[in-house]
Every structure is written in C-alpha cells, then in structure tokens.
Amino acid sequence: MDKSGQSFMFYLKKIYTMKVSIGLLAGMTLLLVSCSGVKTTPESVLSLSQKVEAKNFTVKAQYAQPLSGKQIFLTSEYSLTVKKDSVEAILPYFGVAYSAPYGGDGGIRFNEPITDYSVMPNKKNNGWKIQFKVKAPEDFYEIFLNIYNDGSANFTVNSNRRQSISFMGEVKN
C-alpha cells in the first residue's frame, strides 16, 4: 500500500475510534440521567412511614404475575387499600381456580376486616414487610406485602380456592 493509502486508513481508524468514544460517552450520560430519576427524600420516607404505621395507604397495581405464566401489564385501575382495620381489594385474577363462586367476576374483590396484621422493617432496612389475613364471604386470603422507601410495592395474595398471584405497583395517596 502506498503512502496515501496508509494515511487514508489512519484517518478511517481515527474516525472510528472517535465514533466509538462518542457512543460510549452518550451511553454513560443516558445511564446517569435515567438513574437520577428515582429520588427518595427524607420527607417522602417519613410520610410513607406514617402511612404504613397508621394503616392508611393504597397500592395501585401495575403488573400481575400469575404463579404459572408471564407478567401481565394492567391497563385498568386495580388496587389494594388498607384503611385502619379493614382492607379493600379490587384486583384481577389470572391463574388456576380450584373452585370459584357461582356468578363471580373472576377477580379478587372484597372489603373486609383485617386479622393478624403485622409490620416490620425489611432486611435491607429500605422499607417494610407487612402481612395480614382477610376472611371474605367466598374465600380466605393471606396477603404478603413489601413497601419500599421509594414508594414501590409488591404483594402476593394467597387464597384457599386459587393459586397464588403476585402484583407490583406503587403506593399512592
């Protein structure tokens, strides 16, 4: 290869190296910007802590995870609301039902008193583990709920008549 061919290849390598460097820099900047979106202020943690202690919060479910199946994005409003000594659930159900009430809508719906309510900090001390039981007319439920300092939450609903199902979402006012 002659001298002009070598310098042309040299410039091509230099341009390629610059493009790779710019791409890496752009990717790292995008990563830093996306990570900065989750902010937990002491005030928001205190407010969330007060809601948990007062048993006054609502978890809006955004995803459902059946015991056997893929995660499902929920397009309608579904929630689990704890108010003092009762809980209201308006949740869908995907999975195997061992027996179902006649004429039911197939979802998990109740507004009943809570029994055996317990709350404790989770292992990493970045939220709370809550569990309680509910006796509804058509079934008996046991709920295992995790609420995190950033407001995210996940919970599992165990039932006597159906397979377990889990939900992910966030705590709302």
Image (cartoon, grey):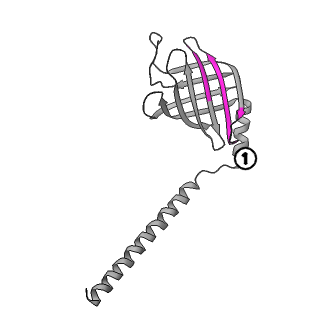
Give x and y (percent) for residue 100: 47, 13
* Residue at x-position 48% and y-position 31%: 65
Task: Depth check: give the residue in front, 33 or 3.
Answer: 3
Q: How many marks?
A: 1
Snapshot quadrant of residue 141: top right
Position of the C terminus, as image quadrant, is top right
Residue positioned most to the front: 1
Residue where numbered disc 1 is placed: 43
Give x and y (percent) for residue 150: 63, 44
Q: Tell me the element at label 1.
A: helix
Snapshot quadrant of residue 57: top right
Give x and y (percent) for residue 10: 35, 82
* Range of residues picked out in magenta: 120-144
For this view, does 114 lie left or right of residue 166? right
Please identify the dominant SS of the magenta region: strand
Q: Is residue 173 visible?
A: no
Judge the density around disc 1: few (<14), some (14-19), many (≥20) Cα neighbours within 10 Å: few
Q: Eyeballing the image, is 56 above or below 136? A: below
Q: Is residue 71 magenta?
A: no
Q: Is residue 126 magenta?
A: yes
For this view, does 154 lie left or right of residue 3? right
